[in-house]
Amino acid sequence: MEEQAGRWHAVLKESEVPDGDPVPCSIDDVEIAIYRVDDEYFATSNICTHAQALLSDGFLDGHLIECPIHGACFDIRTGKAMTSPAEIDLETFPTRVRGGSIEVLIPARP
Ligand code: FES
């Protein structure tokens, strides 16, 4: 398996992320939202690409997060901007669980 460039960071315990209710966290200067859907974890940038709202304050429906300000929806699996007014996709991050902690892979930045 190809090694992913970057570093894994433990961010939250599994018990801290309820199903369907996003939780914010930050790693260094990266603002991240953690989502749990059917016991699977996803991580995206927590900042809406339209006008900087926090997506962790938004509404999660399945794998779609709806921005609390103007209602743009993003797919948390891919980061794809699904509805206007957002046109730019969200950054997403790989996740894994180790010893009950959710870890997020932050890619090496140039
Ligand atoms: S700030 Fe998110 S849609 Fe406008």
Image: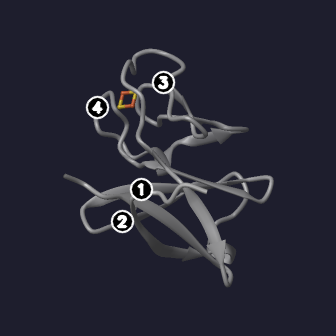
Give percent across and percent down for residue 50. Answer: 32, 27
In the depicted view, which residue is nearer to us: 86 or 106? 106
Kind of residue at badge 1: Ile
Q: Earlier in the sequence, mark 2 or mark 3?
A: 2
Q: Are marks 2 and 1 in contact (CB under 8 Å)?
A: yes
Kind of residue at badge 2: Ser
Q: Dot 2 corresponds to which residue?
A: 26
Q: Dot 1 corresponds to which residue?
A: 32
Q: Earlier in the sequence, mark 4 or mark 2?
A: 2
* Residue at 69% over, 76% down: 15
Q: CA distance from mark 4 to mark 1?
A: 16 Å
* Residue at 34% over, 32% down: 49
In this rendering, would 52 be left or right of 83? left
| Disc 1 Cβ-to-ligand 1 distance below 8 Å | no
Bin the neighbour count of mark 1 within 10 Å (Cα to Cα): few under 14, some 14-19, many 20 and up. Answer: many
Q: Earlier in the sequence, mark 3 or mark 1?
A: 1
Q: Earlier in the sequence, mark 2 or mark 1?
A: 2
Which residue appears farthest toward the top when viewing the image?
A: 84
- Res. 81 mark: 3
SS of the residue under disc 2: strand
Q: Are marks 4 and 2 in contact (CB under 8 Å)?
A: no
SS of the residue under disc 1: strand
Which residue appears farthest toward the bottom when viewing the image?
A: 99
Q: Earlier in the sequence, mark 4 or mark 3?
A: 4
